[in-house]
Image (tube, coloured by chain):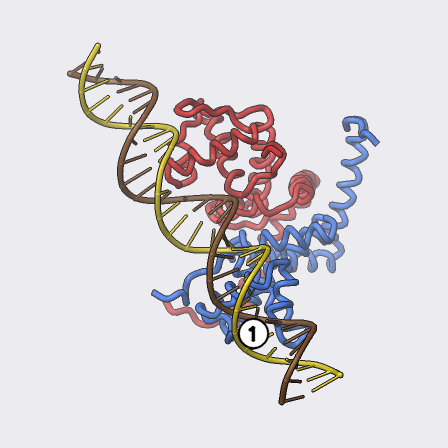
Chain colours: A red, B blue, C yellow, D brown
Amino acid sequence: MSLYNKQLSASLEDYLEAIFVLSQTGRVARSKDIAEHLQVAPSSVTGALKMLAERQLIHYKPYGYVTLTDRGRQMAGRIVRRHEALESFFCDILGVDPDVAQRSACLAEHAISSEIASRLMLYLEFLSSEKQSGRDVPRAFQGYCRQTEIRSQGTQKPSHT
Amino acid sequence: MSLYNKQLSASLEDYLEAIFVLSQTGRVARSKDIAEHLQVAPSSVTGALKMLAERQLIHYKPYGYVTLTDRGRQMAGRIVRRHEALESFFCDILGVDPDVAQRSACLAEHAISSEIASRLMLYLEFLSSEKQSGRDVPRAFQGYCRQTEIRSQGTQKPSHT
DNA sequence: TTGCAAAGTTAGGCGAACCTAATTATCTTA
DNA sequence: TAAGATAATTAGGTTCGCCTAACTTTGCAA
């Protein structure tokens, strides 16, 4: 009846991801850093850390440093890879503004199943291999987008600038 | 200070979408139908309908039928198109199980920006046009997936069946 | 070494979104 | 047309995730 196997909410996934990311750049993840990274109040972090500790995803003692358990690092890694795959797809394939891509990836990473995540990674790999074979799909798509813009020139409603 | 322009939560978007979908199949969307469609208790529907009415997205009177306003239909349409684009991408391009694709689309539709949504639709269009020109990218990807499966045959950890 | 600033936690409260149970309204049909 | 069935709403409660304010702990500097 413990929380050990209960799956994480989107919010807790964000905390776990933040700890992972911060652990990589600086050496330890402090509450303050996590709070800043996620733009929440420090007291919200405390609550989240307790939840993650109950699930044995982090080592946590009040007033102490936060580190990931093996389990936690594994799970955080999955989330980060998911995020990166989505961000890369939005930005590099769809050609969306990097900042927008980052923000949407942050939300969508909690929404897609693991089956979709792994397929997406494979798809990105596939497009890379295609490029090496001289078929640059993203580039062709860029061209298609430009064409479409031109084709729809006259059909736009007039802008108010 | 009204809610008119406040943007919808994921949950309210789901209700709006359900009303739209139900209005298309049967003629009117009853509370009961919405509740069944979204798998929530009828009393939850009542609360949501009040919120949507405050935002002038539906016509709602207690015990009466629910219909979309023009504004509501417009917004619901955007959500549905988003959903369809995601579902199609997951299923037709990535080759994921239709049921899984449907479920993830339902969640991800609330996560992606409108810029990404329109780009994704354009990308699907692009792949169709490519197919007509004899370049079937999804099919090539399928082949790539099969290859990868074969290549990684020996590197799998043994299954316990 | 003490004493203050910074960091972290606890306490208490709020809104969103759901639930169950009880009540009210509407519909149907005998 | 009146009663019972069905649908919808209200009332009240739970959980989650956040907040502010007050407090405690820690660490650094004089």
Q: Is residue C25 above or below residue A58?
A: below
Is residue B78 something that shows in the picture?
A: no
| Disc 1 residue crowd, few under 14, some 14–19, many 20+, Cα 10 Å | some
Q: Where is residue A87 in the image (x, y as percent from the top left)?
A: 55, 43
Three-letter code, disc 1: Val
Q: Position of residue A68 (x, y in %)?
A: 53, 25
Q: In this view, does A81 lie above or below A152?
A: above
Q: Is residue B61 left or right of residue B127?
A: left
Quadrant of the image occupied by residue A63: top left
Q: In which quarter of the image is the C terminus of chain B?
A: top right
Residues A65 and B73: in front is: A65
Residues A56 and B138: in front is: A56
Residues B144 and A108: in front is: A108
At mark 1, the secondary structure is loop
Q: Is residue A28 above or below residue A18?
A: above
Q: Where is residue B16 in the image (x, y as percent from the top left)?
A: 55, 65
Is residue B138 something that shows in the picture?
A: yes
Disc 1 chain ID: B
